[in-house]
Image (cartoon, helix red, strand yellow):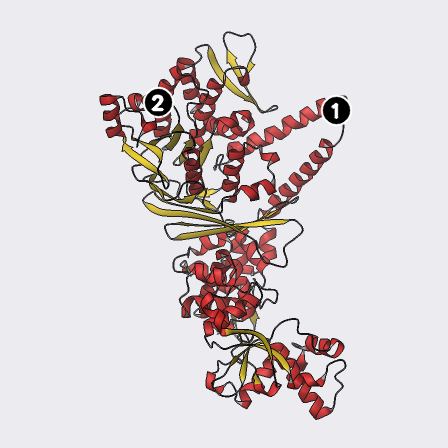
Amino acid sequence: MSDEFPIHESEIDSFDPAPKRYDLHDLYLDPNNYRLINHPDFTEVQEADIQNGDVQRRTAKLLCGPKNQHIQDLLNSFKKNGYLPVDQIQIRRLPSDGFVIVEGNRRIAALKHLETERKEKGIELGELNPEIFQNVPVVIYEDSNELHHLTLMALKHISGNKKWAEWNQAKLLEKLSNEYQLDEEEICSRIGISKVELRRSLRALSLCAQYRDSDYGDQFQESLFSIFREAVRLQKLKEWLEWDDRTYKANNEEHRNLLFSLMSQEPDETTDDEGRASYADHYLEPAITKRDDLRTLSELLDDDRAMDKIIHSRDLNAAYRASNLVFRERQKASLEEVSRAIETLSQLNVAGDHVPELEQNLGRLQSIVERTRATDTTGVEQRAVFHDRIDRHFSKIKVIAYKRLQGLSLEKLSRINLVAGLNNTGKTTLLEAIYLLCRQNDFSGLLETQRRRGKIPEDKLDAEWFAENLPDEICVSGVYDNTKCSVEVRNYLEENSEIDRAHYLKSIEITTNFGGRNQESVTRMFKGRKRETRADGIKLLCASIFSSPFFLNEPHRYMGFYHKSVQSKSLPMILKFIEEKVVPTLTDVRLVDEWQRFLVTDSQFESTLDLTEYGEGLQRIFFISLLFASARNGVVLIDEFENAIHANLITGFAGFIAELSLLFNVQVFLTTHSKECIDAFVKNLPESTGFSACALVEKAVRIEACEFSGERFRRLVEAGDVDLRRAR
């Protein structure tokens, strides 16, 4: 049996691998084959009626198609090459004599047709030996379990190399889910498909059902299924429809009916000479006839003028021309042209007399960036979040599986959370897990954690290194804003024959849930070429920023944080703290856009200095402080908080962190090796500022969290100078 069929162990005994040979008359076509279900003449047949002559003739007609067009390729092949048993014909025994075809119905239909034509018309068979009609090689499955047979068909025609149409695939998946009550994990493992593909098919079928129940239901055809499948893939369209991932329903009736109308013929209401309405036989044609039309529609949903044009003209192209999309595409084309020009210049030895022109253009580009940032309401984070306002941050986090952390629970979380522990107890790993939970199905979050762990610059990240170092299993859950949330990541090798195998490394699937709202993404990694990511949409749990000492080496990464701090008017507050607690002579820090550097105005010096001329402690304090404006209503994760910061400065900075977290409603998680750092937070945070402390402790079996509420830990420190790092 081929390795591509992961049949369950309990089913192996039903399989006889030795080929048998039977006469064509003993082999019956399957009238319930999923290849046929989208045909208007399809009728489900009971097991006892499979051998009925009329049933077999109708099945053969459906399989062969008009003028045998559905089997013409096989007829030509048999005559030219003879019968080549490249793929097994799989059969199962019927209660009476004979066998029904499980796999290979088209080939049997072709052989039966040739046998009939030879007997009745004496046609030439070419290279086909007529003895094949009495000696067809088959493989028998003695088990009559339909689930087993459905699995075989799915392996061949859903995840295999002989794929059915999308509608037929989806109907088989629906039967496994609804009739056999298989959960997602069971279906995916049986067939070898991703949850993304499974859920998308089931969602599309559910939307089809709503269409069939609508006023336009009599116009339903299986050829529309690809459009429905696209509809449940496009996040913007799903939000417009108020799609519910728990019920698989579009809940906005007005928008749903408009979509269905645009996909259907509409009677053209006219009036006669006396003003009476008449529908006659004239219909307005559908505005949406293919997948690409839905993509265009999704881009026009926020443009009231374009949508009004669609409704009244039923002309997507006219609406597109009336929208802002044309202008945006011109912008995109211009940016691509600039990128190509820069790429060319980077490979040339540019003469020195061109430097002034380059600097002038750099300044103009930077002005465009600043103007865009000034009008950008999303700030640094370019992904949408579920809710702009929240009542509560994380109250629980459970790292079910991520690297060394297995089943680690945190349940005493607060606004500021101190995480301590000895070396190699998983402190950074915990921050990474929280970050991945915040990022949900955003692949760039996974990329960022691996990059930080390897201390690799963005432009140096190697796809092979990333694929090799990715954990086998990632599963993190929690409660955020009083709502359950989770993220799961798995990496696997796809069997899809359309993948560029010469460069393919692996695929990474991310599935998430927030309050019943499911999201997925699948990314294919390749060596020497760009990765491919497919996702219905990406929404983050909240704004989240990860800070580690290593990224002091990349000050350009803080440009966005700086501009957001300027917009929020928190920069003067940061500079005032630095002047009072760190460098009394410092009066200003400015970003110089031409060089992407920070310049410091210091009364001790006549000219400005680069921020890197100062100690790493000042740099770290400045950069960490910039993060909070960009993480409003979200989470800031700070690894090795005390790194590069002098012990004398930690006390004041701890209080300032608490002040910023309150100002921007940010939850803080920070790790530390330093008892001085822990004591600074315990002794200097206002009692009104919620905080908690936890130690990661390595036990015999796994790493566990020893948690303390802020109030309890403060009492312990005051009573006995407790060292959190050595908690047991």
Side (left or right) of 727 relative to 44: left
Q: Mark 1, residues whose alpha carbon is within 10 Å: few (<14), some, or many (≥20)? A: few
Q: Is residue 166 above or below residue 372?
A: below
- Residue found 54% across the figure and 55% down from its top: 297
Side (left or right) of 496 relative to 437: right
Q: Are marks 2 and 1 in contact (CB under 8 Å)?
A: no
Q: Quadrant of residue 568?
A: top left
Q: Is residue 323 above or below residue 334?
A: below
Residue 368 x %, y %? 60, 31
Kindly report the distance in space between the C-alpha atoms of the residues bearing marks 2 and 1: 55 Å
Is residue 324 in view?
A: yes
Identify residue type, mark 2: Lys
Q: Is residue 48 above or below residue 390?
A: below
Residue 265 x %, y %? 54, 69
Residue 508 x %, y %? 53, 49
Residue 49 x %, y %? 48, 87
Identify residue type, mark 1: His
Q: Nearer the viewer, residue 409 or 703?
A: 703
Q: Nearer the viewer, residue 681 or 367?
A: 681
Side (left or right) of 82 relative to 470: right
Q: Mark 2, residues whose alpha carbon is within 10 Å: few (<14), some, or many (≥20)? A: some
Q: Is residue 675 above or below residue 126?
A: above
Helix, strand or loop under label 1: helix
Residue that label 1 marks:
354
Q: Nearer the viewer, residue 83 or 667?
A: 83
Residue that label 2 marks:
675
- Residue found 52% across the figure and 38% down from its top: 450
Q: Quadrant of the C terminus?
A: top left
